[in-house]
Image: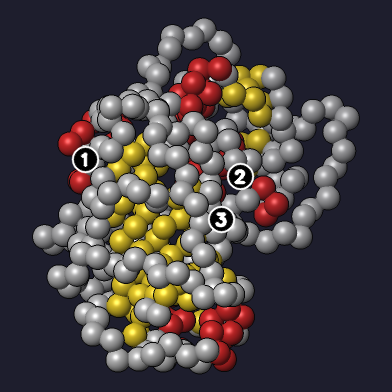
Amino acid sequence: MKKPAGRNSSAGRTGDSGRSGPPARPSNRNKTSAPAKPAAPGRGRPSSAAGKAGTAAATPAAKPDRNRAAMRSAPVAPAAGAARPRRSKVTGTNTLDMLDPFEPQRLSKIMAAKGLCSRREADYLIENGWVRVNGKVVDELGAKVLPTVTIDLDARAKNVLGKQVTILYHKPIGVVSGQPEGRYKAAMECLGLENQADRKTSTPFQPAMLKGLAPAGRLDIDSTGLLVLTQDGRIAKQLIDANSTVEKEYLVRVEGELTDRGLEMLRYGLSLDGEALKPARVSWQNEDQLRFILNEGKKRQIRRMCEIVGLKVVGLKRVRIGRVMLGDLPVGQWRLLTPEERF
């Protein structure tokens, strides 16, 4: 199968899976992908859109008065009679499997490794006395425990974590995901009541929603589509951890000729930086546009993959992360992740 070459598309350096180097400045393009033409037999089809209304809140609970004994420097041992666990051979970074079960670690690190919250959130909960280790309150920052202990959260801790917001933003070209760069705005600077798509059906924008908000993954300045910003460390870990397998789907507009062999190479046969890529699902969406579904995120991965097989990326749009779709969210607008939605 060959795709005809020679279309008149404006070229631009385009982002990919969300871990890019210094971005190029955007062109005057504002549209990234052309409407999909009916797919020929055997070609990929788009996924159906998910619902888009949501509700959340974002103010942390005040630090309460308390009268209790703090657990101090000695590491907390496993519960009596607990079996000595076997070490897992699973590899990763900052995961419970990587921790020595017989070596004390900071409680906040253990909580993050167990997926209870981020380390920063753990310190907040510990400081407020909302964390119990083997049934005893621990409120000393820096306290060390063994990875095999039982950790429970106070209802107030669960309430604080439950009020954290996650924002789905349709990032336009010319907006950076993280910190602002020169005259280019950061995504967080573009969030307000005036461009909240679900303001009539969900919690209206509040300045507190920006506190602790950070992008969970990135899109380059020349890319558009779904960008997740969250206060929830658990969601951030789920999406950007080195071991994350959450799928990310892109529509990629290209120039050049792609052979059947080139298409198979995109799917199964490429390496970047000396490391073999995981299999990717790649199919034609129309004569100008490919659909990529990845579950890893190398630096500028899609752009570099296309270059290897002789294609030039001239537009990239992320339309799905896990089970959450961009759907019909207008460019430049945002909405809250609903309680029913899961990545």
Q: What residue type is disc 1 on? A: Asn
Percent across and percent down for residue 231 are 40, 38
Of the numbered discs 2 and 1, the one sitting upstream in the chain is 2
Percent across and percent down for residue 37 are 40, 70
Of residues 133 and 61, which is closer to you in this image?
61
Residue 338 is drawn in which quadrant? top left
Q: Is residue 210 above or below residue 174?
A: above
Mark 3 — residue?
246
Percent across and percent down for residue 210 are 28, 36
Mark 1 — residue?
195
Residue at x 52%, y 65% (from the top left corner): 45
Residue at x 75%, y 45% (from the top left corner): 102
The number of numbered badges drawn on the structure is 3
Residue at x 25%, y 37% (from the top left corner): 196
Residue at x 32%, y 47% (from the top left corner): 329
- Near mark 1 (Cα within 10 A), the count class, few <14, some 14-19 or many ≥20, is some
Mark 3 or mark 1, whichever is nearer to me? 1
Of residues 258 and 94, which is closer to you in this image?
258
For numbered disc 2, what is the local secondary structure? helix
**Residue 113, which numbered label?**
2
Decide if residue 274 is on the left or right side of residue 225: right
Disc 3 from disc 2: Cα separation? 18 Å
Q: What residue type is disc 2 on? A: Ala
Of the numbered discs 3 and 1, the one sitting upstream in the chain is 1
Decide if residue 191 is on the left or right side of residue 237: left
